[in-house]
Image: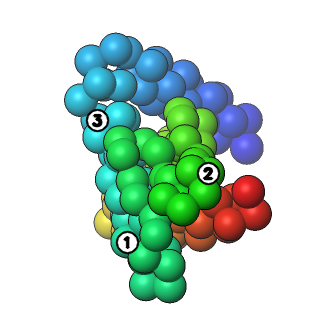
């Protein structure tokens, strides 16, 4: 258990340090967040065509109400914690890879549901 905890914390430190670099933020995090906003708007447009996305912003055209998806709200940090836990856990690499892939999609799917919910609650 102690070994898992040390690996878990160490991997998180490395992953979060990489995520915080300006080049990763500009080339990966911001475009990814814009993609999450675009996917969210596409799903909302199935029921309400008066919604647009501009970068990381979802906006209701009629009322002008908008929601901005910022760092910390895009699910990246949750995925990094999940990846650190999976990598630190003693299991075969094929299971780790499967867990990372399915975990990523599960976290982001729930995050999109959360974003849409917050948009409509606003």
Taking the image as shown, residue 57 lies to the left or right of residue 114, namely left
Q: Position of residue 9 (x, y in %)?
A: 62, 29
Label annotation for residue 28 = 3
User: Between residues 37 and 54, which one lies in front from this camera angle?
Assistant: 54
Is residue 75 visible in the rendered image? The answer is no
Label 3 and label 1: CA atoms lie apart by 21 Å
Residue neighbourhood size for the residue with mark 3, other residues' Cα within 10 Å, grouped as few (<14), some (14–19), many (≥20): few
- Name the residue tied to disc 1: 42
Report the residue at 43% width, 84% height from top.
46
Q: Quadrant of the N terminus?
A: top right
Which comes before the other along the chain, label 2 or label 1?
Answer: 1
Report the residue at 33% width, 53% height from top.
35
Element under label 1? Answer: helix
Element under label 2? Answer: loop
Q: Position of residue 117 (x, y in %)?
A: 67, 67
Residues at discs 3 and 2 in contact (Cβ within 8 Å): no
Q: Position of residue 100 (x, y in %)?
A: 42, 59
């Amino acid at each position: 258990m102690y070994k898992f905890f040390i690996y878990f914390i160490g991997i998180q430190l490395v992953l979060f340090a990489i995520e915080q670099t300006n080049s990763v933020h500009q080339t990966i995090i911001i475009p990814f967040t814009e993609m999450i906003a675009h996917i969210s708007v596409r799903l909302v447009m199935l029921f309400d065509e008066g919604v647009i996305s501009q970068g990381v912003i979802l906006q209701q055209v009629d009322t002008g109400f908008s929601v901005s998806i910022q760092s910390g709200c895009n699910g990246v940090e949750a995925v990094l914690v999940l990846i650190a836990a999976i990598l630190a856990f003693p299991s075969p690499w094929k299971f780790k890879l499967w867990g990372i892939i399915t975990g990523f999609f599960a976290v982001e799917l729930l995050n999109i549901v959360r974003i849409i919910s917050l948009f409509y609650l606003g």
